Amino acid sequence: MTVTDLVSYEDALASYDPVMGLEVHVELGTATKMFCGCATTLGAEPNSQTCPVCLGLPGALPVVNATGVESAVRIGLALHCDIAEWCRFARKNYFYPDMPKNFQTSQYDEPIAFDGHLDVQLEDGEVFRVGIERAHMEEDTGKSTHIGGATGRIHGASHSLLDYNRAGIPLIEIVTKPITGAGARAPEIARAYVAELREVIRALGVSEARMEMGQLRCDVNVSLRPHGREKFGTRSETKNVNSLRSVERAVRFEIQRHAAVLDDGGVIVQETRHFHEENGSTTSGRVKEEAEDYRYFPEPDLVPLAPARAWVEELRAGLPELPLARRARLREEWGISAHEMQSALNAGAVDLVVATVEAGADATSARKWWLGELARRANEAGTDLTALPITPAQVARVAALVAEGALNDKLARQVIDGVLAGEGGPDDVVEKRGLRVVSDEGALGAAVDEAIAANPAVAEKVRGGKVAAAGALVGAVMKATRGQADAGRARELILERLGADA
Ligand code: ADP
Ligand code: MG
Ligand code: ZN
């Protein structure tokens, strides 16, 4: 099906009610793998971080990573889940070359955490509650690289390379209950959910959860049912959607595609689908297996887990302030709207602003520099704000120099240029580039006198009471001082010299 066959989004929503399910895989940032002691360092020489366990060699026996279990419990608690008193791992049996054991060690009907929720805030400030069905532990597969094909896909490739460094890295899969009642906001809710979940994961410190690095990936299930119908429609499952924007687009596309099929009297087949970044479409993957096909059975080589209640309570007590509550507190402290907080969040600026305020800046200027000037620079450079070579302490110093009148905004931007160019901290750049507001009366007075002398007609108007005309003289002073004059003080001096009252 091509994009032009879609039903318009509005028409789809007029006839149908969307139901969603989001499955998010988070790669934990543990030092070692889930069932062996192999390192998890990114970018290592292929197959250098492997052992008999993660290569599935005969006779090798797995051992559970305690930090992995602890992270799973903390994620479960942060999502308001119940923590199982007792649970087991299970084998999910299937063959794929990137999975040398021929089964994935996962959890099936005994997840470590279940029945929770995550509240997400939408652009308009409204809070929507997403039910969490379960969070369970499993392991990642290796990575295949297909050589010789045009698209990097297996089709048309002459051969494939396999790197098992990723095989066995701990994953937590977090599965929502069916999300109903979202209506036209389904795409926005899906995006906000994944964004909020990412914040929670980061706040817990269990993973950096960088989607562009595959540390957090989302499978998007969508179905439609006619308005008023209780029973869910058949879902499609779009796999491995790797950015927030793509999550939103995938939901939207699938709603429009399902509506087109259903309007035509067709049936939706339960299948996995691939998402295409280029045009936001999805295409058919494989027809979905039933759980029975995997022949799940309890993992015989690992003992069951029985997280002690006292330990669970200890972990609960040690949870950090959760992101939604934290942002509500910060909004209050910074005096900003839900929408402004959303912009800060989307720009990845919340923690940077917090750190800048901690370094002494006021919240308004901290937000101004990070969300205005620096967000623009990050955008131009195609990087994240956090990747810019400037620290919150340096931004706070720039703000302080502006506050004490040593810099104006224009000069401050040049100071930021210098810091980003590696010329040192703000004070070094001010020193090296000679960027100080000219406010000493001597130099400024001379510049004012010159401006008056060079613009007699304007000066005459000001003398005659047209105070507004003084702007042109201030402009001349700023030009003569290459933007370094204290504009307010220059204006005062001009009016004084010309005997006009401000
Ligand atoms: P699978 O492993 O087959 O993908 P899961 O239960 O792990 O199954 O995930 C299915 C996801 O889709 C869950 O989030 C679930 O709530 C959701 N879901 C189930 N049925 C439907 C449906 N008919 N329409 C939309 N979402 C659904
Ligand atoms: Mg699934
Ligand atoms: Zn190993």
Image (tube, rainbow, N blue to C red):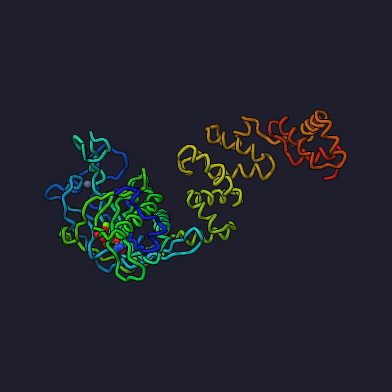
Q: Residue at x 34, y 63 (%)?
A: 19
Q: Kindly indicate the quadrant of the structure image that contains residue 394.
A: top right
* Quadrant assignment for ligand 1: bottom left
Horizontal and vertical percent position of residue 379: 49, 41
Is residue 484 something that shows in the picture?
Answer: yes
Q: Kindly indicate the quadrant of the structure image that contains residue 212.
A: top left
Image quarter of the C terminus: top right
In the visual, does 197 lie left or right of 343?
left
How many numbered tags mark residues here?
0
In the visual, does 450 lie left or right of 51?
right
Is residue 311 something that shows in the picture?
Answer: no
Residue 140 sits above or below residue 48 on the image: below
**Which is nearer the eye, 473 or 43?**
473
In the visual, does 250 lie left or right of 292?
right
Horizontal and vertical percent position of residue 246: 38, 49
**Which is nearer the eye, 374 or 230?**
230
Horizontal and vertical percent position of residue 463: 87, 38
Q: Which residue is drawn at 49% across and 60% down?
A: 326
Horizontal and vertical percent position of residue 322: 45, 60
Q: Kindly indicate the quadrant of the structure image that contains residue 315.
A: bottom left
Q: Which residue is drawn at 55% across and 36% down?
A: 419
Farthest-out residue, left: 58
**Which is nearer the eye, 371 or 455?**
455
